[in-house]
Image (spheres, rainbow, N blue to C red):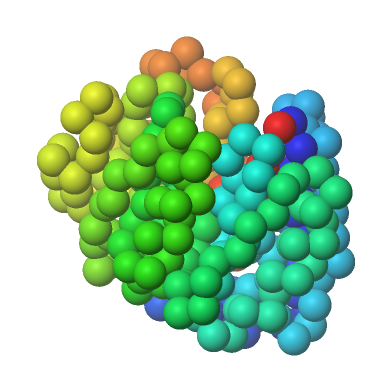
Amino acid sequence: MKAIVRKVSSSFEHALANFFGSGPTDLSEALVQHDAYVSKLIDFGVSVRLIPSHSGYPDCCFVEDHAIVAGDSALLTNAGHDSRLGERKEIEDALSSDLNLEFMSKGARMDGGDVLKFGDKFLVGHSKRTNRRGIEDLEKFLSSRNYGLHVVEVPPESLHLISVCTSPVPGKLLAPKGWFSESDFPPEAEIIWIPKEEAYAANVLPIGDKVMMAKGYNSTLKILQNLNLEVHEMEMSQFREADGSLTCLSVLYD
């Protein structure tokens, strides 16, 4: 497995924040946390390509938002917030040697943080950052590759779908109580509900039988351990303050 990861911007303290956080406060600590994240990916056997940051883009470390990977191809998105549109070029360049690239149409907006692969389909969140035109473009991209698409309305309390819903193991979704109902998800999905107050912990990054989760959420930790996963807790405090999570920090592909 490979990963594209981008270094934290020197302007990270100005990152967008309206949901889980109120803005990063400590760039040095963010760099330490990011280094630990990269090291853990490498420990998991992932080949990491680390690309430079850009001082003009405070949110540029959140690379997941710019590409949706399906098989040997990637759909490059038009980020949902105008301030982030200029971040995509470096992601495009980094992926171009390994994947076939397609691009969203003008007027389509989407953050990759609203897209979750789940078996033979993808879940996509309709959110503040992802519009209907973006969802239509994604559906065309996926249908030509024999993937289905299931649309989920993202709760107003959340920035993205994957902020509060991921799949730690095949066939199961992790989500906080009170944020969704079972009818929001595909009927074949088994929903593992975590406490509402641990909503941030619903964003986990599984690789094989190992999984990263944010540190400090004991109920979710026990739930993941009961799935026979090797759980690795990661300090994510500075990224939480920028409304970012574990999956946000990489584009993963085979």
Q: Quadrant of the N terminus?
A: top right
Residue 90, given in percent of the width and then of the height, sits at 79, 67
Name above or below for residue 9 compared with residue 150. below
Q: In this view, does 107 lie to the left or right of 174?
A: right
Residue shown at 83% from the left, 36% from the top: 47
Q: In this view, does 235 lie to the left or right of 160?
A: right
Residue 35, given in percent of the width and then of the height, sits at 79, 52
Name above or below for residue 147 compared with residue 249. above
Name above or below for residue 17 compared with residue 71. below
Q: Is residue 123 visible?
A: yes
Residue placed farthest to the front in the image?
Answer: 144
Q: Can residue 39 be seen in this view?
A: no
Residue 68, given in percent of the width and then of the height, sits at 57, 51
Q: Quadrant of the C terminus?
A: top right
In the foreground, 138 or 228: 138
| Quadrant hosting residue 26 | bottom right
Residue shown at 77% from the left, 52% from the top: 95
| Quadrant hosting residue 45 | top right
Residue placed farthest to the top in the image?
Answer: 228
Residue shown at 42% from the left, 28% from the top: 120
Q: In this view, does 232 lie to the left or right of 163?
A: right
Residue 97, given in percent of the width and then of the height, sits at 85, 49
Q: Is residue 213 left or right of residue 136?
A: right
Count every numbered label the image shows and give the total: 0
In the foreground, 76 or 57: 76
Residue shown at 64% from the left, 50% from the top: 74
